[in-house]
Amino acid sequence: MKIILIRHAQSLSNLQEDFSFKTDDKDTLTELGIKQAKLTGIFLKFLWTKESIIISSSSQRAKQTTELITQQINSNIPILFDERLIEKNQDECYEKVAHRASQALNELKENYQQIFCVTHGYVIQSLISNYLQSPEPSCFHSNNCGISIIIDNRLFTFNSVIHLSNKIKIDPSMFHLITGGHLNKAIISKAIKFDIINKKKYIWNVFKLWQLTTNMSVEEVSIQDFNLEKNVWFLQEEAPTFLNIIKHYQRIVDADLSFPIILAPDNEVLDGSHRIAKALILGHSTIKAVRFQYLPTPDLVEDVEDYD
């Protein structure tokens, strides 16, 4: 069973930070929100199958998001609206929100293999925390139209917003990586990989890297061959705060060592630093890897003047 959680697009209440709107019909999408919803629909079209259904919160901002998404997929798709998916109110705890939202989703499991669920930030936090048995739901904050995917009670994608980017050209067919071949073992929570060289930021779409390595042979490489003193996570925007450290700790715990890391020709790690960390913790001396003979062209190059 696959559950695709989508947070509603940007609405007026998001701009005003006024959570009193909640189910108010006046809380409609902004111009940006309309664009976000349409881009999300174009992206999700590649995941839609005849065994799918879409269910939405009955709140106006979620309903409007859902209608725009379905217009891009297929305007004839029936939509279910359910009050159990509305945003958390002041008197509810996360557990109560997770309980009512799970009820709405569980009722569909027998008849559908894939559920698209358009809902709200706190609801998504509650559901993911419930599936992962996490004590801190607030770690799972989602952006507007962020996509999170749960397969068989396991989090495979969290808050992916790469489909909303205006800078990186996205091939929507990359989403087949989530369900095909050995790639279904990957935890997909990081959409881009970047390195900073000579004050330039080179950015690669990790989904595309996976696609390019699908048919590569897997080798065992020595972990000691890597620069284990390199700062690979806390660069520029991300500081080593409690929450960020916990986020990386969780990714290390969830890392699947049967999925190979991706290496550049010079042995730089393009994807898989959390798998390397897990292998070190477990006392492994080698790790599975695939290696590019030539470095793929970056999807984006930016100047970075303030990086030391």
Image (cartoon, rainbow, N blue to C red):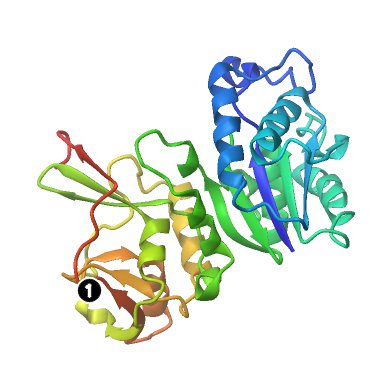
The residue singled out by tag 1 in the image is: 226
User: In the image, 265: left or right of 79?
Assistant: left
**Quarter location, residue 293:** bottom left
| In front of the other: 95 or 149 | 149
| Quarter of the image that includes the N terminus | bottom right
User: In the rendered view, would you say 27 is above or below 157?
Assistant: above
In the rendering, at what x and y percent does residue 9 appear? 61, 29
User: In the image, 260: left or right of 158?
Assistant: left
Question: Is residue 133 among the parts visible in the rendering?
Answer: no
| In front of the other: 217 or 141 | 217
| Quarter of the image that includes the C terminus | top left
**Quarter location, residue 304:** top left
**Which residue is located at x 25 percent, y 57 percent?**
231
Q: Crowdedness of circle 1 by 10 Å Cα count: few (<14), some, many (20+)?
A: few
In the rendering, at what x and y percent does residue 238 appear? 36, 44
User: In the rendered view, would you say 116 is above or below 1?
Assistant: above
User: In the rendered view, would you say 150 is above or below 169?
Assistant: below
In the rendering, at what x and y percent does residue 10 appear? 59, 25
Label total for image: 1
* Residue positioned most to the left: 198
In the rendering, at what x and y percent does residue 196 appear? 19, 48
User: In the image, 219: left or right of 128?
Assistant: left
Q: Secondary structure at mark 1?
A: loop
Question: Is residue 79 among the parts visible in the rendering?
Answer: yes
User: In the rendered view, would you say 209 is above or below 195?
Assistant: below
Q: Amino acid at mark 1?
A: Phe
**Which residue is located at x 86 percent, y 45 percent?**
100
